[in-house]
Structure formats: C-alpha cells, structure tokens
Amino acid sequence: MTYSEDKKVHRVRKGPILALLFSLLLWFVGIALGEPDRVMELARQVCLSCIGLG
C-alpha cells in the first residue's frame, strides 16, 4: 500500500444531511401550527367511534 492510497479523501454526503434538516424544519412548522393537537383529537374521535361511544 502506497502513501497516496492511505490518504483517501472522505467527502461528506450532503443529501442525507439536507433531508434531515428539511424534515426537522417541517416537524417544527407542524408543531408551531398545532398539528399534534389536531392529530390527537382525530385519534380520540376514531377510538370513540370504534368502541361505539361516538
């Protein structure tokens, strides 16, 4: 093995990092718009109608 083979350049892949940052951005926007409350309300309605109370 020569000296030049030992010094491989490790490039950082930008695609996965950008995808992670974009998903985190969308997650924060959803929380800011109150989506968790809406999802829980819909889940409660579905559960209550499933067991015959709604």
Image (spheres, rainbow, N blue to C red):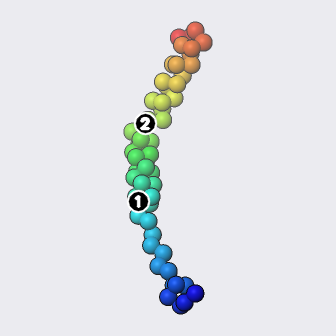
**Residue at (50, 80) in percent of width and height:** 8
Give percent across and percent down for residue 22.
40, 52
Above or below, comparing residue 2 to residue 25 in the picture: below
Residue 54 percent location from the top left of the image: 53, 11
Helix, strand or loop under label 1: helix
Kind of residue at badge 1: Gly
Distance between mark 2 and mark 1 Cα atoms: 29 Å
Tell me the number on the disc at residue 34: 2
Foreground mark, 2 or 1, reads: 1
Query: Residue 1, relative to residue 45: is it above or below?
Result: below
Disc 2 and disc 1 in contact, CB within 8 angstroms: no
Q: Secondary structure at mark 2?
A: loop
Residue designated by label 1: 15
Q: Is residue 41 visible?
A: yes
Q: Is residue 44 above or below residue 25?
A: above
Disc 1 packing (10 Å; few <14; some 14–19; many ≥20): few
Q: Residue at x 48, y 75 (%)?
A: 10
Indicate the quadrant containing the N terminus: top left, top right, bottom left or bottom right: bottom right
Query: Could you tell which of marks 2 and 1 lies nearer the N-terminus?
Result: 1
Residue farthest to the top, as pictured: 52
